[in-house]
Amino acid sequence: MTDYDNTNSGVLFRNDKGDNPKRPDYRGSMNWNGEERWISAWIKDGKNGKFMSISVGDLKEQKQDSGFKEPPPADDFDSDIPF
């Protein structure tokens, strides 16, 4: 199998909206200039027919927005705390 360059490409999968109609119809990820991004897409009706409205964001920010917090590196510990 040959190696495939995934730079500047991505993929979307159908999303289970559950009981929230505001959730995107499709979710996925992409690589943009070597950085991983998330993609969300909604199918909408327009005057010229159906279209997809797309939102792209930083994958690290999405983890933080979901409540996921990475601990700070041990090197950032400040031992001169005044209390």
Image (tube, helix red, strand yellow):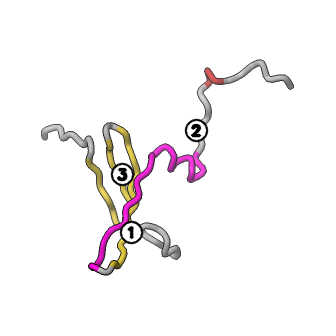
Please state the extent of the stretch shown in magenta in the rendering.
Answer: 48-68
Q: Position of residue 83 (x, y in %)?
A: 86, 25
Q: Which residue is mark 1?
A: 42
Quadrant assignment, res 76: top right
- Give the number of callouts: 3
Residue type of the residue flagged with mark 1: Trp
Work out how far the residue at label 1 is from the one at label 2, CA to CA, in angstroms: 30 Å
Pointer 2 local density, CA inside 10 Å: few below 14, some 14–19, many at least 20: few
Mark 1 and 2 residues: CB-CB less than 8 Å, in contact? no
User: Which quadrant of the rendered structure holds the N terminus?
Assistant: top left
Query: Residue lying farthest right?
Result: 83
Res 29 label: 3
Q: Position of residue 20 (x, y in %)?
A: 52, 73
Looking at the image, is mark 1 or mark 3 nearer the viewer? 1
Left or right of 3? Residue 48 is right
| Chain-order first, disc 1 or disc 3 | 3
Residue depicted at 60% across the width and 50% down the height: 67
Pointer 1 local density, CA inside 10 Å: few below 14, some 14–19, many at least 20: some
Q: Which residue is mark 2?
A: 70
Residue type of the residue flagged with mark 3: Ser
Q: Position of residue 22 (x, y in %)?
A: 49, 71
